[in-house]
Image (cartoon, grey):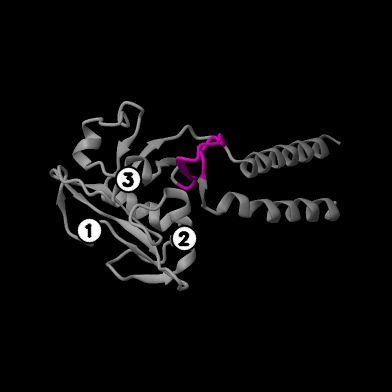
Amino acid sequence: MKRTRSTYLAILALLSPMVANAVLIEGNCDGTSDATVTCDDLSALEWLDLTETLGLSGADFLADIGGWVSAGWTFAATGRVDQLFLNGDADNIEGVGTIGNRTPAEQFGQLFGITIGSGCSQGFSDAGSGLGNLPGFCALPNTALGIFWGGDTNGTIPLEEGISQAGVWAYRDSAAVPEPGTLALFGLGLAGMGLARRRKKI
């Protein structure tokens, strides 16, 4: 019995990181492939690549130019984008020049595309009252450093203004699909309960 219990504990220890670690994954949250979408498995939101909406203003997006709203995408509020950055391991997003590890910024560039060049991107977010912000990230060239800047860092811009080097931060809700690690833990728990019940009967 001690050996069986030790085996269960070892399996739990191996599976728990798969459930606990929040990651950004290219593709839809249901596991289907889509190079223009990134799944934030912590919030269960799917995010559209910035390069897909490059050059659109916030007002253009809301007017459904490009058909993104009709396709189920929502113009992201600034706070939601800031949370996406934190979920993706941005060191800090308070203010311009917040310099940290290059790796998260580099990963964001691979997932969301490059809009400015030199490893940098930005996109419009909804600041409310007809105004937008421009949260973004940059993997500094030829260095080990990266920068994330929060949505309110550069002040606000009327939503009608477009910037050729900015996309639009847009997301959609995904259907909650259990990860393989979650399913494995659930199955292990059921098996353990069945075993305990069986032993009580004996």
Q: Are marks 3 and 1 in contact (CB under 8 Å)?
A: no
Camera-side mark, 1 or 2: 2
- Please tell me which residue is depicted at 34% across the width and 70% down the height of the picture: 98
Which segment is the magenta one? 26-42
Residue 63 falls left or right of residue 100: left
Spatial CA distance of label 3 from label 2 is 18 Å
Question: According to the image, label 2 marks what residue?
Answer: 106
Q: Amino acid at mark 1?
A: Asp
Q: Quadrant of the C terminus?
A: top right
Q: Nearer the viewer, residue 143 or 76?
A: 143
**For the point 20% across and 46% down, which residue is it?**
162
Disc 1: which residue: 152
**x, y percentage for residue 73?**
34, 34
Mark in front: 3 vs 1: 3
Query: Which badge, 3 or 2, is on the more N-terminal residue?
Result: 2
> Mark 1 vs mark 2: which is more N-terminal?
2
Q: Is residue 42 left or right of residue 164?
A: right
Disc 3 marks which residue?
169
Image position, residue 44 (x, y; %): 46, 41
Mark 3: amino acid? Trp
Expressed as whole percent of the image width and height from the top left, the position of residue 82 reads 33, 55
Earlier-in-chain disc, 3 versus 1: 1
Q: Which mark is residue 11?
A: none
